[in-house]
Image (cartoon, rainbow, N blue to C red):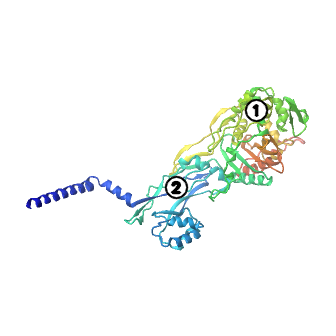
Amino acid sequence: MGKRVKGVRIFFMMFLALLGARALYIQVVTPDRILTLAHKKFDYNIKLSAYRGGMYDKSGQPLAISLDVKSIAANPRIVENPRAAAAKLARALNLSEPSVRRRLASTRYFTWIKRQVSPDELAAVQALNIKGIGFYNEAKRFYPESEALGNVLGIVGIDGQGLEGLELMFDSLLKGKPRQIEVRKDGMGRIIYARGLPPDEAKDGYTLCLTLDRRLQYIAYSELAETIRGHNAGSGFAIITNPVTGEILAMVSYPSFNPNIGVYKTMEGHRNRAVVDLFEPGSVMKPIWISWGIEKGRIRPNQTVFCENGKFSYHRKVIHDHEKYGWLPVTDVIKYSSNIGMVKIMDPVKADDMYSCLDLFGFTSQTGVQFPGEPDGFIRQPRRWTTVDKATVAYGQGFAVTGIQLLTAFNAMINGGMLLKPYLVDHITDAKGRDIEYFRPTIIRKVVSPQTSDQILTILKTVAIKGGTGEGASMSAFQVFGKTGTAQKIDPLTGTYSKKDYVSSFIGGIIDASGKPRLTMIVCINEPQLSYYASVVACPAFKNIMQKSSSIMDLSPNITVASKEPGAQGEGI
């Protein structure tokens, strides 16, 4: 008996020794592991929207900012009478009652009811005083310029991720660090304590400082919208740039959308047509061919061409002009926009050389503008061109380009001959305002000489004077230069050119008192219904936008001073 008791005592002593050693190991040697396991059981992290960096225009005005708003959540386990609570919450938050009821029927300890609520919704729910309902701060994106910049800036998702536009393009820089709050639960799983955000959880997304001017953006959008509505057109876009630097000062598309609403019945207004839409440019391409021909010594501005009195049979295809023209110098071929004249001028040029011209001016590749979804130009390889194809390409049909490609090439033609990379972002700063990256004018390549550039600019000035197709774009205070374009569209049903659907455009700019091009712009109106000629549709829109923009920018007018000699012409200063 004594031996048995002694054995039991030894067993218990050994058991207690092992238990003590284990406790010593757990509490002294590896305490962190136990604490980690305890935190996993009793702590719960709730993910919140990150603070994104803002976007600002060239003068520092906000275009996209993140502000704190309230989100509403529930602990379904402690909500009393979930059915009645669901009915009240659904009415206050304009939600589906069955949806709220399902959330409150969950066995989880946390579920969102509605995120990023309005102040009125917040007040309504707080007045209900329902047990188990909590309120949390989250960052919501606001866009002060609304529709005017909707399809350029883009939108973000409910968790703050960029979905479209610049928000998507620069998402990795704009988004802040993941934000979360730590919730502590008791042994029954009930939330007993919610910690706030750690002090280092600051608004740490980078800031984009854009080249856009919100004033010019608003002017261009308003005029574009009025033009499209006035002509019952389907859509359109406009871009304003500084031709010497490549800065994009305004970029608008219509229809657009309000990024502050967050509910979209159609995605039609989300497209930045100035960058992503391909279209056949029409006659706005004619000066490109002329500048290339002058540079190569194949075309002289004073050479003349017979325009067949408005009707020309070319390899079984009949080419028409809108007026009956006879002999015209090259300058007047551009001024009056003669298709027949362009076909005859470009007839001796090989298809390979024409393709090389398009490639030189950047139409076969992306411009590299800081915006997602930019396509290459759609241009068939020259070996597949027929003789008639070559003729139609001469007056801007049979291939497709984007608006930003057109304006980039146009700028190269009139700025002294340099093809510049267009850009929307001027510089980027971090959360503390320190400069991270600057974007500056980037020369891609030289396309023509300064002498050729001056010659083509002189030709383009004739378009906007009396008798030119762009006369409707002329301004009293500034000298205007440019080119009209009225391009037929392909009928998707027949695969042939439509006789009623056109793209009307004007591409040009103004010269101020310095004597140099100061602003350039393209206006493109898709499928105008009342009249499709660019002189009637696009030119007045260009004029209205440029007049208001030049006033806003305080440009010095190109004033005409009367000469002292009677009957003498004035001299521009």
Per the rendering, the mark at residue 51 is 2
Left/right of residue 455 with respect to residue 21 in the rendered view: right
Q: Which mark is residue 81?
A: none
Quarter location, residue 406: top right
- Side of 181 relative to 23 (left or right): right
Q: Work out whether residue 329 or residue 321 is closer to the camera in this orientation and state it.
A: 321
Of helix, strand and loop, which one carries label 2? loop
Residues under labels 2 and 1: Cα distance? Answer: 50 Å
In the rendered image, which quarter contains the N terminus? Answer: bottom left
Q: Residue at x 8, y 61 (%)?
A: 2
* Front-most of residues 83 and 540: 83
Mark 1 sits on what residue? 291
Residue type pointed to by label 2: Tyr
Q: Is residue 573 visible?
A: no
Residue ID at (57%, 54%): 157
Side of 310 where 417 appears, left or right:
left
Query: Quarter holding the C terminus?
Result: top right
Residue at the image point whose x is 48% and y is 72% from the top: 80
At which x and y percent is residue 226?
76, 54
Mark toward the viewer: 2 or 1: 2
Determine the residue located farthest toward the front in the rendered image: 1
Expressed as whole percent of the image width and height from the top left, the position of residue 67 reads: 55, 59
Mark earlier in primary sequence (2, 1): 2
Query: In the rendered structure, which amino acid carries the disc numbered 1?
Result: Ser
Label 2 close to label 1 by CB (< 8 Å): no
Q: Position of residue 298 (x, y in %)?
A: 78, 26
